Image: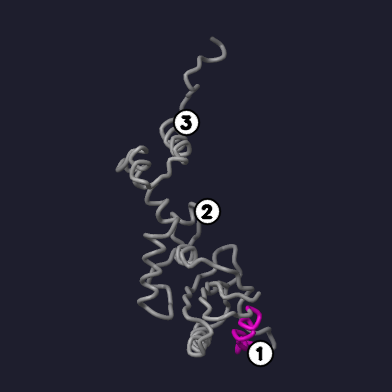
């Protein structure tokens, strides 16, 4: 794939090798930013790995990038080199939220994980840039705004009409908001919508 969009992959490189290669890509103006986080293998995964996000500074061929990240396996030189799987386009907000295994984010995707991580577990190219991206993922991203709205509704901070009147929820989504509030208050109870039972 040839792309200048942000991309992500799973890397099986050693951290020292990966950090050195990423620094070289920045020095050569091939990429302008990178973030990675090391994950312990979950019960359904084969081995520990690194989730890597890269922001290209130019048009990149991801196969060339994969070749650049090939690392001889010093534990057994006859094995295939360490490296990364195919790159995919990636939004940094999702990368950070997933990378941390932030439980509310995973739950919104219908997922759970054994291991959760912290902000301190991320490694990055530039601290100021990372702080800005991290804050946006948790406070300014589309997912964060939806999550904050649901939390506010759940805690009774706003009524559904407040959310429509202050512009948080567009008027054309009032029906969905009403359905949500109805499910929340009536789930698990008998409700016939004002009709009598079929035996009456």
Assess whether residue 75 is covered by the magenta stretch: yes
Spatial CA span between label 3 and label 1: 61 Å
Residue depicted at x 62% and y 89%:
72
Query: Residue 121: which quarter of the image?
Result: bottom left
Q: Earlier in the sequence, mark 1 or mark 2?
A: 1
Badge 2 marks a residue whose secondary structure is loop
Tell me the number on the disc at residue 43.
none
Q: From the viewer's perspective, is the residue at label 3 or at label 1 nearer?
A: 3
Query: Residue 134: which quarter of the image?
Result: bottom left
- The stretch of residues the image draws in magenta is 62-76
Residue behind mark 2:
109
Q: Earlier in the sequence, mark 2 or mark 3?
A: 2
Residue depicted at x 49% and y 74%:
38
Residue behind mark 1:
77
Assess whether residue 168 is covered by the magenta stretch: no
Residue depicted at x 47% and y 79%:
33
Spatial CA span between label 1 and label 2: 40 Å
Residue behind mark 3:
188
């Amino acid at each position: 794939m040839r792309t200048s969009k942000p991309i992500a992959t799973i890397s099986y490189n050693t951290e020292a090798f990966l950090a050195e290669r990423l620094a070289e890509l920045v020095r050569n103006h091939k990429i302008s930013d990178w973030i990675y986080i090391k994950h312990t293998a979950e019960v359904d995964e084969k081995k520990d790995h690194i989730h890597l996000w890269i922001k290209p500074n130019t048009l990149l061929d991801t196969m060339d990038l994969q070749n650049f990240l090939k690392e001889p396996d010093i534990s057994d030189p006859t094995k295939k080199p360490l490296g990364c799987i195919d790159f995919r386009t990636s939004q940094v907000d999702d990368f950070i939220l997933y990378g941390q295994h932030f439980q509310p984010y995973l739950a919104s995707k219908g997922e759970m994980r054994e291991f959760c991580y912290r902000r301190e577990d991320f490694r990055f190219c530039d601290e100021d840039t990372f702080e800005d991206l991290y804050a946006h993922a948790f406070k300014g991203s589309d997912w964060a705004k939806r999550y904050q709205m649901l939390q506010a509704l759940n805690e009774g901070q706003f009524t559904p009409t407040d959310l429509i009147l202050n512009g948080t929820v567009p008027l054309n989504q009032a029906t969905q908001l009403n359905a949500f509030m109805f499910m929340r208050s009536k789930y698990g109870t008998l409700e016939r919508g004002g009709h009598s039972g079929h035996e009456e």
